[in-house]
Image: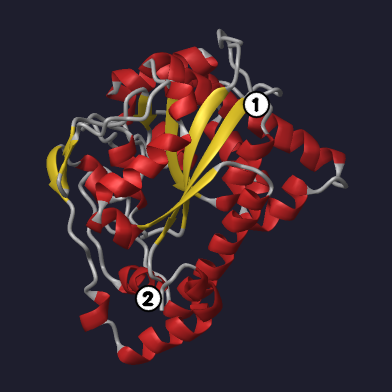
Amino acid sequence: MTAQQPLAGDGSGAGAPSGTGRVTVLYVCGMPRSGSTLLDLMLGQFVDHCDVGELFYLWQSGVERNFRCACGQHFDECPFWGEVGRQAYGGWANIDVQEVRALQRRVDATGKVPLIVGSRVTPGFRQDLERYTALITKLYRAIAQVSGAKVVVDSTKRPSLAYILARAPEIDLRLVHILRDPRGVAYSWSQVVELPEGTSTKGRMNQRSARLTARRWVTVNAMISSLARSGVPRVVVRYEDLVRDPRSELGRIAALTADVTGQVDPLSFLHGTEFEQAGSHAVAGGRIRMRSGPIALSLDEKWRREYAPGRRRMVGAMTWPLRRRYDYR
């Protein structure tokens, strides 16, 4: 799929609807490899919720590279995403994907958070930020319209996007802060993980050093906590608790959007520690997004047995103060 026309200066495209009211976004944020895709799929089974995976990567994985949607179809063949593109921008052909990705790099990055929240920024950055906000607001609104859902679930995880959504006038942001023991996260990043055909160019997930993972674990979770202190509604969920007692943890999340849906979700899709994955249009995320049918929840703590003791101790030492706050002792 190739873009034919430049991105409009205000983030709009031909035929895009204006829309009214605010769009409620349930944003899953945290460190990658913390169980966010699993959580995203479960939240997508909530009444009046639509999960879309890691929406930040739609431009690269979907519009540019035409990878497979979680429904199994390639992006340009998926009826759901085709209709979303038409309603948001008059069609994906109206989007210059290279310009969108350049715009992302200028505003949607961890290092840009001080500028996103700052009052003194250059006119150029402010213009880019407003343009990007308008662009993605149209996308969230179109997803809600096409799906008929009252809540859009985005598991992008990036703190920078959460900060952008928090200041977007047409977005009603709610946060699910997903956590996992940093030693488990670091072990996961050290592993070679193959990806399903048609969902990546390299065929496997990226790897990252233990030191970098530990530093990022502290930075990412601290930034999310700081955003929550500004008044954005948040529920903190540990991966380990979610797998052991999914009904209790999901119930707390359901209460976060009950005022929007008009009910606390009955969680009828959940059966003990197994849930029924009834389908998804997640555009990017972990490989589990491509599965459907029953999915059994089981705690993955291979890191306790298999992670090199030296690296495990280093990650533990680097993350100790924040790790202790979330009861990872």
Element assignment for label 2 = helix
Counting from the top left corner in percent of width and height, residue 165 is at: 61, 37
| Dot 1 amino acid type | Ala
Picture layout, residue 139 above or below residue 129: above
Q: Is residue 166 visible?
A: yes
Which residue is nearer to you in this view: 295 or 156?
Answer: 295
| Dot 2 amino acid type | Arg
Q: Name the residue under label 2.
A: 183
Which residue is nearer to you in this view: 12 or 20?
Answer: 20
Residues at marks 2 and 1 touching, judged by CB atoms closer than 8 Å? no
Counting from the top left corner in percent of width and height, residue 110 is at: 62, 56
Q: In this view, does 46 lie to the left or right of 117?
A: left
Q: Name the residue under label 1.
A: 134
Residue drawn at the location 40% of the way across and 41% of the way down: 253
Q: Is residue 67 visible?
A: no
Which residue is nearer to you in this view: 138 or 166?
Answer: 166
